[in-house]
Amino acid sequence: MLHLRRLALAGIAAAAALTTAPVAHAASATDTTSAASASAVVTLRFDDSQARGWEAAIAAGVASWNNNVDNVKLVEAPPGTRAEIQIVATTGWPQATIGPVRPGGRGRVELGSQAVSQGYDKTRIAAHEIGHNLGLPDTKPGPCSQLMSGSSAGTACRNAVPDAAEQSRVEAAYANRVAAHTATGAPLVVDAP
């Protein structure tokens, strides 16, 4: 009888080990996935020191991208360091290099005051032009809900948030910490209506 009792206790212990093992394994897989996701973030530095008058719009445009994509983070480059994205203020129409720009690459954003004088929203302009550096083309004509519809959405449009498809395209371009190509030498796309 003692032998049967030991056998029963051993069976219970084995069953308990089998039912808890997958739970422990699942938790460690989740932890590994989280760690992999955190390490898969591509950081791109921007320099807006030549974009006087656009600081608030740039900050809001950068925040829009940082809040809506998980594997790319835009950070301001410390003074004197190289930035992948150069942001400047101009008197013409907004324009930008089509990316995706990757670490060590070079992209350019020109925030044109001509669009502002015609009534277009500064924050939408900044977010839209940064979207080009992240690899998105224009989607003209398009609705206000699409950030990359740009000027075709009209001057009343204030949306500076990429829609789900735009977010997905950027995340795909930066999957596995590598952008599809570097924007070095890419032409500027002018966003005039």
Image: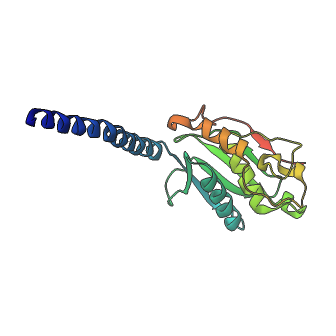
Closest to the observer, 50 or 141: 141
Going 78% across and 46% down the picture, which residue do you hit?
A: 148
Q: Position of residue 42 (x, y in %)?
A: 52, 44
Going 22% across and 34% down the picture, which residue do you hit?
A: 11
Quarter of image, res 139:
top right
Q: Is residue 61 above or below residue 165?
A: below
Q: Quadrant of the N terminus?
A: top left
Q: Is residue 25 left or right of residue 107?
A: left
Closest to the observer, 63 or 95: 63
Q: Is residue 78 left or right of residue 62?
A: left
Closest to the observer, 37 or 45: 37
Closest to the observer, 168 or 11: 11
Quarter of image, res 112:
bottom right
Q: Is residue 9 left or right of residue 165?
A: left
Q: Position of residue 55 (x, y in %)?
A: 67, 66
Q: Is residue 100 left or right of residue 143?
A: left
Rendering colour mode: rainbow
Going 83% across and 46% down the picture, which residue do you hit?
A: 149
Q: Position of residue 31 (x, y in %)?
A: 39, 45
Quarter of image, res 33:
top left
